[in-house]
Image (tube, rainbow, N blue to C red):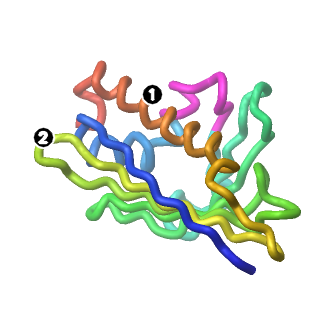
Amino acid sequence: MGSTTFTYDYSSPVAPSRMFKALITDSRTLLPKLLPQFIKEVNVIQGDGEAGSIEQVNFAEASPFKYVKHRIDEVDKEKLVCKYTMIEGGPLGEKLESIAYEVKFEATSDGGCLCKMTTKYNVIGDFEVKEEEIKEGKESSLGVCKVVEAYLLQNPQVYA
């Protein structure tokens, strides 16, 4: 099994602790509320939502995928780091065995944060993941960040 890793950053004027809470620790509640046209629901189907848990994201009808399952590998609320792995559904199947994610929020001098995202595609056989093939997924992730950021800017008391 080979792998290909991509890294990208997202800069936000929102404090790192608020972005972490919105996108990581409370995402099961917040994302279906903010993005009902894409995310129907997020459920913990095994565990307590911490490391070792399995969560299932069910997508809305318009989505190209019905669902994905993630295994939560690490949630560090002090360092504002989350690691999780897509283990079922979505784009997985003939070419991809799993996709591992690491999301890290770092403070910036202006009071905002830099969100660093690393995605590791674990492939089956000789398949190679090219950057243009993951463009839609990357843009979708950045779009979620922008929606959450806008919500937090409009609601400064949330996760403060």
Label 1 environment density (alpha carbons within 10 Å; few <14, some 14–19, many ≥20): some
Q: Quadrant of residue 149?
A: top left
The residue furthest left is 109
Helix, strand, or loop for circle 1? helix
Label 2 environment density (alpha carbons within 10 Å; few <14, some 14–19, many ≥20): few
Name the residue located 67 percent from the left edge and 57 percent from the top edge. 130
> What residue is disc 2 on?
110
The residue furthest right is 94
Q: Quadrant of the C terminus?
A: top left
Name the residue located 51 percent from the left edge and 25 percent from the top edge. 34
Q: Quadrant of residue 15?
A: top left
Name the residue located 29 percent from the left edge and 41 percent from the top edge. 18
Report the disc number at residue 147: 1
Q: Amino acid at mark 2?
A: Asp
- Please state which of residues 6 and 71 is positioned toward the viewer in this rendering: 6
Q: Is residue 154 magenta?
A: no
Q: Is residue 32 left or right of residue 58?
A: left
- Magenta range: 30-41
Q: Amino acid at mark 1?
A: Val
Q: Is residue 26 left or right of residue 65?
A: left
Q: Are marks 1 and 2 in contact (CB under 8 Å)?
A: no
Count of labels in the image: 2
